[in-house]
Amino acid sequence: MVVIGSHVSYKNESGLAGCVKEIIKYGGNAFMFYTGAPQNTKRGPIDDMRTIEALELMEKNQIALEHVVCHAPYIVNLGNDSDKDKYDFSVRFIREEMDRCETLGVRYLVLHPGNALKQERAFALQNIAKGLNKILREDDEMVILLETMAGKGTELGITIDEIVTILEGINLKEKVGVCLDTCHLHDSGIDVQKFDDYLKEFDEKIGLHKIGCVHVNDSKNVLGSHKDRHENIGFGLIGFDALLHVIYHEKLACVPKILETPYVDRLYAPYKQEIKMILDKKFNEHLIEDIIKEGSL
Ligand code: FE
Ligand code: FE
Ligand code: ZN
């Protein structure tokens, strides 16, 4: 089966086991979670019993640990170092997040590269590499995946060349990879209809082996809008066929494809129906109605 899943919620009470149960409900074989609210850095202790339960459930349901991804909160920022306390906090928090991942056995941590704010972009890209050099340790078994961004505000890491610049500044290069996000690519100005051209350039400049995760989202906005507003699969301006091409791309076969599409009416998770549609390889024009119907049962 294609490696497909969605982002799921992590709660301190149910730990990693709660995440696994949620993705099983959706019919996925990969998942992504935040160890707490994505908007803040409050984090609870990890319950090892829940992790053991999760690993057993994963084995029974053929979910490989390599297809589990953690996402760091959005509010840490390695891109701007003008406030040393804030910058050091981000460094410390990401380090602690890696330690939490290692406790859970998770190998990938997705990180938004950062925001330049009022600093020069070229300088800000160096701040990211500098921060990662403080965070990464020789004995780390996990990999940080820098996510490609839409270019909203002063976001960094919006072109292949910017990612290259960050990677060049990193000492332990094998510990850093990339997470593509189709909505962000589209909003940054890359035409997902011509995804193979993008992959070719990526391969020449970075290498496809560096891609550790793909976020599959449609986009509410036009190409190059720099907005970053996700849409349900097939209901946005990227479209079902282009997204299906990414999901089933032979060069990304082993990479987890993770849906981060919006809840319908802010209430109903769309992932079960979206995964079904993807596995059927057939667009369901009644997807939204089906999600509401199923969700309100
Ligand atoms: Fe993200
Ligand atoms: Fe994303
Ligand atoms: Zn996004």
Image (cartoon, rainbow, N blue to C red):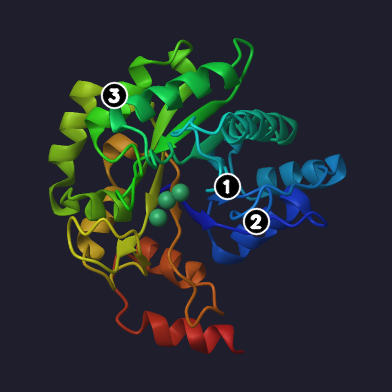
Mark 1 C-beta closer than 8 Å to ligand 1: no
Q: Nearer the viewer, residue 86 or 92?
A: 86
The residue carrying pointer 1 sits among few (fewer than 14), some (14 to 19) or many (20 or more) residues within 10 Å by Cα, namely many
Residue 106 showing in the rendered view: no
The residue at the point 67 percent across, 53 percent down is: 20
Q: Dot 2: within a 10 Å radius of its alpha carbon, few (fewer than 14), some, or many (20 or more) residues?
A: some
Nearest the viewer among 1 and 257 is 257
In the rendering, which numbered label is found on residue 37? Answer: 2
Q: Residue at x 44, y 84 (%)?
A: 290
The percent coordinates of residue 209 (x first, y second) are 35, 25
Q: Amino acid at mark 3?
A: Val
Of marks 2 and 1, which one's residue comes earlier in the chain? 2
Task: Identify which amino acid the numbered label 2 is placed on.
Answer: Ala
**Residue 269 % position (x, y):** 54, 72
- Say left or right for 226 vs 215: left
| Residue matched to label 3 | 164
Q: Which quadrant of the structure image shows residue 92?
A: top right
